[in-house]
Image: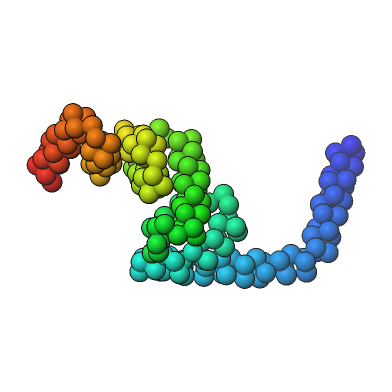
């Protein structure tokens, strides 16, 4: 008897739940197309930005990448792509517009590095982001931070010989021939070893 009453209550709950779902059904049926439309526009933005980047049209990709960064602030890859477009766009390096974009690129790359470090202390993705951060610091004229970023890049990804070469170039630029010679020799040894491995 007691079980029968419990079953009836349970069936009543299920029936009530089913009726509530039927009442919500029209609203649920309308939500997916709107969401799908938004996702379609987002995919179109991503596709357009990617094609422009792949074709080297960095300045043209900036509005799309900025919009994607607004829509998806959590997406580290979009932040990274925007930072690269800001950093490597065509234009006069001394212009105030480029300097503002360069500061934005540095902030975004620092954010990308911080996100990557949370994932792993080493790796290709972290090394690459640190490399581009070093380039951004170098363009901004901050050789100390550039050197540090290249050094961290090379430690994060031992195959980043370009970071090691840039460390050598910075030491040359700073007028440290002893340190530059040591880095150059290390670079040449690693290049020779890598050629043998290929």
Colouring scheme applied when the structure was drawn: rainbow
Query: Which residue is rendered at x = 90% and y = 42% of the image?
Result: 5
Pick the front one: 132 or 101: 101
Residue 17 x/y as whole percent: 82, 54
Pick the front one: 65 or 40: 65
Query: Which residue is rendered at x = 55% and y = 57% of the image?
Result: 69
Say which quarter of the image contains residue 90. bottom left
Q: Left or right: where does residue 198 sit relative to residue 81?
A: left
Residue 170 in the image: above or below residue 79: above
Query: Which residue is rendered at x = 45% and y = 59% of the image?
Result: 95
Residue 131 x/y as whole percent: 35, 44
Residue 151 x/y as whole percent: 32, 34
Say which quarter of the image contains residue 153. top left
Pick the front one: 84 or 143: 143
Residue 100 in the image: above or below residue 166: below
In the rendered image, is residue 75 in sight?
yes
Q: Left or right: where does residue 41 sit relative to residue 32?
A: left
In the rendered image, is residue 158 in sight?
no
Residue 79 in the image: above or below residue 27: above
Residue 20 in the image: above or below residue 30: above
Image quarter hosting the N terminus: top right
Residue 178 x/y as whole percent: 18, 28
């Amino acid at each position: 008897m007691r079980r029968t009453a419990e079953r009836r209550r349970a069936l009543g709950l299920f029936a009530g739940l089913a009726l509530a779902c039927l009442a919500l059904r029209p609203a649920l049926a309308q939500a997916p197309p709107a969401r799908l439309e938004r996702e379609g526009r987002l995919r179109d933005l991503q596709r357009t930005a990617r094609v422009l980047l792949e074709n080297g049209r960095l300045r043209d990709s900036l509005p799309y990448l900025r919009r994607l960064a607004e829509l998806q602030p959590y997406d580290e890859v979009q932040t990274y792509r925007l930072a690269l477009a800001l950093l490597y766009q065509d234009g006069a390096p001394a212009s105030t517009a480029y300097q503002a974009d360069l500061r934005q690129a540095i902030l975004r790359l620092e954010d990308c590095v911080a996100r990557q470090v949370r994932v792993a202390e080493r790796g290709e993705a972290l090394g690459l982001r640190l490399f581009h951060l070093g380039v951004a610091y170098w363009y901004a004229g901050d050789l100390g931070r550039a050197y540090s970023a290249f050094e961290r890049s090379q430690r994060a990804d031992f195959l980043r010989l370009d970071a090691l070469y840039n460390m050598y170039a910075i030491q040359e630029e700073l007028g440290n021939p002893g340190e530059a010679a040591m880095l150059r020799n290390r670079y040449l040894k690693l290049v020779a070893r890598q050629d043998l491995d290929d």
